[in-house]
Image (cartoon, rainbow, N blue to C red):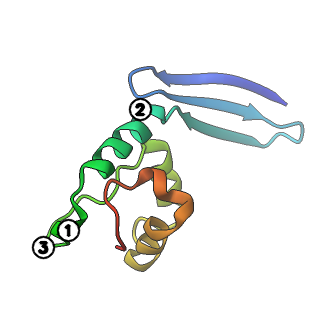
C-alpha cells in the first residue's frame, strides 16, 4: 500500500493522505490534531455555572474539530437532529462538549 501526504493545513492541524491499495482502490484519509480544541472545550466546560440552568434559546454545547465534523456529515449524523443529540450525549464524545447536562 502506498501512502502519501496530499495536503496540509498546519494552522488547523489537518493533514490529508492518499492511500493506494494493492488492489487499485484509493482512500483519502483526513487526520487532525485536536489537543487544542479539547483543551479549550475543557476550559469552557469548567467555567459553566450549572446552577444557572438552561435559560434562553441558544446554548453552545460543543466544539467539534473539522475532521470529526466531516466524518459525522458523511455518516448523516450532522443532518439528523436525533442522531446528533445522541452523539453529543454519548460519554465517549464528552471531550467535544463545552457545557454539562443533556442536550
Q: Mark 2 and mark 1 in contact? Answer it, CB < 8 Å.
A: no
Residue 55 placement, left or right of 93: left
Q: Is residue 77 above or below residue 47?
A: below
Q: Nearer the viewer, residue 28 or 61?
A: 61
Residue sticking out furthest to the left? 56
Number of numbered callouts drawn? 3
Residue at 47%, 74% in the rendered image: 86
Q: Calculate the distance from the C-alpha at mark 2 to the C-alpha at mark 3.
A: 29 Å
- Residue at numbered disc 3: 55
Q: Residues within 10 Å of mark 2 (few under 14, many from 20)?
A: few
Residue at 44%, 20% in the rendered image: 10
For marks 2 and 3, give the one nearer the viewer.
3
Q: Which mark is residue 51?
A: 1
Q: Residue 7 in the image: x percent, y percent?
A: 53, 24
Disc 1, SS: helix
Which of pointers 2 and 1 lies earlier in the amino acid sequence? 2
Q: Residue 52 in the image: x percent, y percent?
A: 16, 67
Q: Which mark is residue 1?
A: none
Residue 17 placement, left or right of 68: right
Query: In which image quadrant can residue 50 be found?
Result: bottom left
Disc 3, SS: loop
Query: In which image quadrant can residue 41 be found?
Result: top left
Residue at 19%, 71% in the rendered image: 53
- Residue at numbered disc 2: 36
Q: Calculate the distance from the C-alpha at mark 3 to the C-alpha at mark 1.
A: 11 Å
Disc 2, SS: helix
Can residue 75 be seen at all in this image of the molecule? Answer: no
Residue at 19%, 72% in the rendered image: 54
Residue 50 placement, left or right of 20: left
For marks 2 and 1, give the one nearer the viewer.
1
Q: Residue 31 in the image: x percent, y percent?
A: 57, 35
Amino acid at each position: 500500500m502506498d501512502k502519501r501526504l496530499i495536503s496540509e493545513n498546519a494552522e488547523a492541524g489537518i493533514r490529508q493522505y492518499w492511500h493506494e491499495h494493492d488492489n487499485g482502490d484509493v482512500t483519502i484519509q483526513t487526520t487532525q490534531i485536536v489537543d487544542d480544541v479539547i483543551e479549550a472545550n475543557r476550559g469552557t466546560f469548567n467555567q459553566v455555572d450549572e446552577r444557572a440552568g438552561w435559560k434562553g434559546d441558544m446554548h453552545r454545547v460543543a466544539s467539534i474539530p473539522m475532521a470529526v465534523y466531516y466524518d459525522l456529515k458523511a455518516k448523516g449524523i450532522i443532518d439528523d437532529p436525533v442522531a446528533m443529540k445522541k452523539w453529543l450525549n454519548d460519554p465517549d464524545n464528552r471531550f467535544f462538549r463545552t457545557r454539562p447536562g443533556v442536550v
